Image (tube, rainbow, N blue to C red):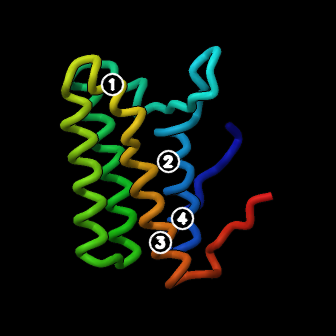
C-alpha cells in the first residue's frame, strides 16, 4: 500500500490514522472463496497469547488516539470495554477466533470516534465516492 499516514494531532490526521488502522485490523483481506472481510486482528489473533497481546495493544492504540481527541471518559470507557471483550473472547481457543470476526471491537470503536468527529469536527468528514 503506497499510503502514507498523516502526522499530527489535528482531528483530520487522527481520523485518517484510525480509519486506516481499522481497515488493516478488521478488513484488509477477504477469506478466499467468500465475501467475508478479515484483517490482521483475526490473523494475528490465531497465534496463542502473543497474538492476543499484539491485537490488544493495537486496539488500545485506537483508544489512545480517541483520548488525544479529547473524547469523554464515557466514550473512552466504552471503547476500552470493547477492546477488553475482544481480548477475552480471543483467549478462548478456536471459538474465540471465530467470535472475533463477529465482534470486531476496532470497527465498533471507529464508529464511536466517527460519531464524535462528525459532531465536533465536521470538517474531517471524508466523502466516499
Q: What residue appears at the point 58 percent right and 60 percent down from the top-left corner?
A: 16
User: In which quadrant of the rendered image does the C terminus lie?
Assistant: bottom right
Question: Residue 58 appears in which quarter of the rendering?
Answer: top left
* Left or right: 91, with 13 as reference point: left
For residue 101, above or below residue 86:
above
Question: SS at mark 4?
Answer: helix
Question: Residue 15 appears in which quarter of the rendering?
Answer: bottom right
The 10 Å Cα crowd at callout 3, few under 14, some 14 to 19, many 20 or more, is few
For residue 123, above or below residue 32:
below
Q: Position of residue 106 (x, y in %)?
A: 41, 49
Q: Which residue is mark 2?
A: 21
Disc nearer the start of the sequence (2/1): 2
Q: How many marks?
A: 4
* Left or right: 53, with 58 as reference point: left
The 10 Å Cα crowd at callout 2, few under 14, some 14 to 19, many 20 or more, is many
Q: Which residue is mark 4?
A: 15
Disc nearer the start of the sequence (2/4): 4
Depth check, mark 2 against mark 1: the one in front is 1
C-beta proximity under 8 Å, tags 2 and 3: no
Question: SS at mark 1?
Answer: helix
Q: Position of residue 60 (x, y in %)?
A: 30, 52
Q: Which residue is mark 3?
A: 9
Residues under labels 2 and 4: Cα distance?
10 Å
Along the viewing direction, whichever of 42 and 49 lies nearer the viewer? 42
Q: Position of residue 103 (x, y in %)?
A: 37, 41
Residues under labels 4 and 3: Cα distance?
10 Å
Q: Position of residue 102 (x, y in %)?
A: 40, 36
Amino acid at each position: 500500500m503506497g499510503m502514507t499516514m498523516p502526522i499530527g494531532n489535528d482531528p483530520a490526521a487522527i481520523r485518517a490514522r484510525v480509519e486506516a488502522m481499522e481497515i488493516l485490523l478488521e478488513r484488509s483481506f477477504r477469506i478466499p472463496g467468500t465475501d467475508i472481510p478479515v484483517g490482521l486482528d483475526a490473523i494475528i489473533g490465531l497465534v496463542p497469547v502473543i497474538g492476543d497481546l499484539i491485537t490488544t495493544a493495537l486496539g488500545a492504540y485506537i483508544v489512545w488516539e480517541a483520548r488525544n481527541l479529547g473524547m469523554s471518559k464515557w466514550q473512552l470507557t466504552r471503547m476500552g470495554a470493547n477492546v477488553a471483550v475482544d481480548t477475552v473472547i480471543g483467549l478462548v481457543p478456536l471459538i474465540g477466533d471465530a467470535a472475533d470476526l463477529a465482534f470486531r471491537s476496532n470497527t465498533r470503536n471507529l464508529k464511536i470516534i466517527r460519531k464524535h468527529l462528525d459532531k465536533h469536527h465536521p470538517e474531517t468528514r471524508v466523502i466516499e465516492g
